[in-house]
Amino acid sequence: MEKDYTSRLNKIDDLPAMPKTLYDVLNKLNSDDTNASTLDHIIEEDPALTTKILKIANSPYYGQAGTVNNIKRAIMLLGFNEIKNLVIGFSLSDIFNSGLECGPIDSKIMWLHSVGVGKVAQSISHRLKIGDPDDFFTGGLIHDIGLIIMCHHFKNETLEIFRLVEEKNISFPDAEEMYGLKHTEIGAFLAKKWALSDFMTNIIRYHHKPTSAGEFISFASVLFLANELCDKTGLGLNYDESGKKLLVPKSLHVNVEFVKELVDMIKEEKKTIEENWGNMLLV
């Protein structure tokens, strides 16, 4: 950050703490002996989370209305990875569902965009065999958490950045660069405060500038492309990015067909993400 906002961040008492459930998932589920009973135990330690998972599991999207009565059955019917993703999503949803309203964004826009980036990054990781797809889903969910902090604690500065976007007809990251306050740096600050991995900290910090990510360039490039594609297809965003040139990192070595397949996937899943994951903020 060109301007010294670190001291201001250190003085903020109500920065979001790392959700306990997210901590449990990232730590307990990273061991080699991970199984469904471990996930079941994590969920059942939180009665509110249990209720939310069961409500979503019985939603029309999964076609299991009234048949999922406990977490073990939810894991069996929906699968370990899907329930794990729902747990991660719910553990973070309160941070997004905090009355966010700042310029052209609000809580739901930020949430849907973040879920979309997570889903797309997960798919890119799986297809290209870069990193762990589940880690990329989590990274996508929190890649813009710095912007949430900016909107809550640096709102005037953030609105000024949005004004620069309109006035100069430049991208939000370019406007941040001009102003001297970057959501990527604030996000990385929080990632360190949460003691997240170097992987997570660096993909947050460099998801707009993957070529600066050093040894993490391929990981940051995955998140960069996922973010670009969600911007391009308007997933979670309420302003038109359709005329924007799509940038594809050379480090990923992908062709046009690969990108088209991802765009088609987003178009197919967009409504599902908006309806199913969007409802998580209301559960």
Image (cartoon, helix red, strand yellow):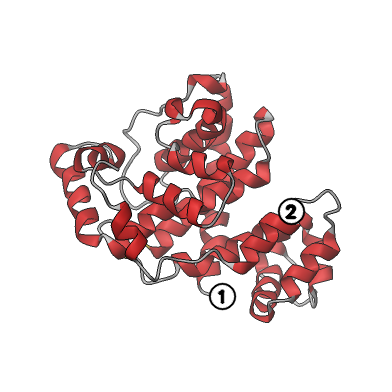
For the N terminus, which image quadrant? top left
In this figure, which residue is indicated by the disc labeled 1? 283
Image point 46% across, 40% down: which residue?
227
Instruction: Tell me the element at label 1.
Output: loop
Q: How far across and how far down the image is residue 82, in percent?
A: 71, 56
Q: Taking the image as drawn, is residue 78 in sight?
A: yes
Mark 2: secondary structure: helix
Residue 144 visible in the snapshot? no
Q: Residue at x 34, y 53 (%)?
A: 238
Q: Which residue lies furthest to the left in this view?
A: 167
Reading the image, the residue beneath label 2 is 81
Query: Dividing the image into 4 quarters, which one contains the C terminus?
Result: bottom right
Name the foreground residue: 174 vs 33.
33
Q: Which of marks 1 and 2 is nearer the N terminus?
A: 2
Seen in the picture, residue 224 relative to 54 is either above or below; the reply is above
The three-letter code of the residue at mark 1 reads: Val
